[in-house]
Image (cartoon, rainbow, N blue to C red):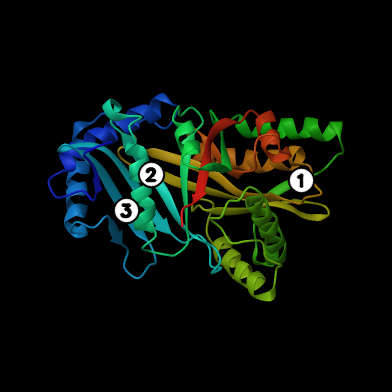
Amino acid sequence: MTGLRVRAPQVGEGDKIVPLWRNLWDLHEAWGSYPGTQDAAVYRALARRIDDESALRRGFPLLRRSGENGGHIHLIAERDGEIVGQVEGWVEANGVDPRTPITCEIRSLIVAETVRGGGVGHALLEELAAVAGTVAPRIFAVAEVLAENPFRPFYRREGYAPVGWTLRYAPVSAETPEILIGAREETARRTIQTKLHVRRARASDGFSAALLETVLAMRRRAVRDLRFDPPRTPDAAQIDALSTYLAARERLSEAAPPLDWIVEDAHGVRGQGTFALLPLEAPFLTGQRAVLGRIAFDPAGDPAILLPPLLARAAERAHAFGAKWLELCDFSAPGTPLYEAARALGATPWSSVMGKRVC
């Protein structure tokens, strides 16, 4: 597209950028995401925040966080004096292994309807990758794309491929745990009677957690999810670190997520999962976002039996905190036993994380 320029926003442009944000949130709500606010005061505050950040950027897209190898990137696309697109990128490390690329999480990519299909989105992603590349020599860019987002083919054309899947269980109600446990018991009757329970992880679970972390890392690498460290053979240092972390988390109450859980039967630990509660902030309507992630099971076990009690515990916590949905994150691909076990329990496709090594 001729006359197109991609650059950092300038002070005073917040009011021109905010309509793109509003359009983005309206689109996401139409695709089944969390509802956005229609309060004009919220968007005025957003415009002021963009201007305040632009003053700190001083014309540079990257706003670094003090003492950290990362930061926040904000870019806009301008054509003939009109702002026609924008994108954000959060650059941060998700691993400690020096071989693990730094992640650039793409957010808020939106192109004005009048210029869609003209290369604006491509230009924004290209410049985002270039700016992220100034932080670290290896960058893995990812974007969470809703299942109903009609622009999913755009990411594929840009070279992005799914590396993680999220399902959603909704609505969450007081009856949800009983329904899910009933589903597990029915499955168990068809296979083998298995008495499972879910409890808080303890310091003594360090070794089991290390083994399950390896299972999780292998699952991620199988789909080329490069955000996290590669699989490793558990060693004393890792086990000690996990034991110390779990000891600290165990002392906190159930009212202080994240909550690390263990799935156990008479033979020992069979799985793990972490429940997190994330606040929904403007421009979303305020509320709670409940997430169950880091799920990993004994490879010899059947996810159709192991998943329901963990999901029931998470649903109970989600309902207690007032969340309407429960997101099941970091799943394996459709057609795999874990994914299909969640689908059999009533979970529906929500989104996929699409990734690409950009440098």
**3 or 1: mark nearer the eye:** 3
**2 or 1: mark nearer the eye:** 2
Residue at disc 2, secondary structure: strand
Residue at disc 1, secondary structure: loop
Tell me the amino acid under the disc marked 3. Answer: Ile
- Going from the N terminus, do you reach mark 2 or mark 1 first? 2
Return the x and y of residue 185 as percentages of the image width and height.
78, 34
Return the x and y of residue 241 as percentages of the image width and height.
60, 71
User: Do residues under tags 2 and 1 come within 8 Å of each other at their CB atoms?
Assistant: no
Return the x and y of residue 64 as percentages of the image width and height.
31, 62
Quadrant position of residue 133: bottom left
Tell me the amino acid under the disc marked 1. Answer: Leu
User: Do residues under tags 2 and 3 come within 8 Å of each other at their CB atoms?
Assistant: no
- Which numbered disc covers residue 310? none
Depth check: give the residue in front, 305 or 149.
Answer: 149
Q: According to the image, label 2 marks what residue?
A: 107
Whether residue 268 sits left or right of residue 57 in the image: it is right
Rendered position, 134 above or below 314: below
- Going from the N terminus, do you reach mark 2 or mark 3 first? 3
Residue at disc 3, secondary structure: strand
Q: Is residue 322 visible?
A: no
- The quarter of the picture where the N terminus appears is top left
Q: According to the image, label 1 marks what residue?
A: 196
Q: Is residue 233 visible?
A: yes
- Which numbered disc covers residue 73? 3
Whether residue 200 sits left or right of residue 132 in the image: it is right
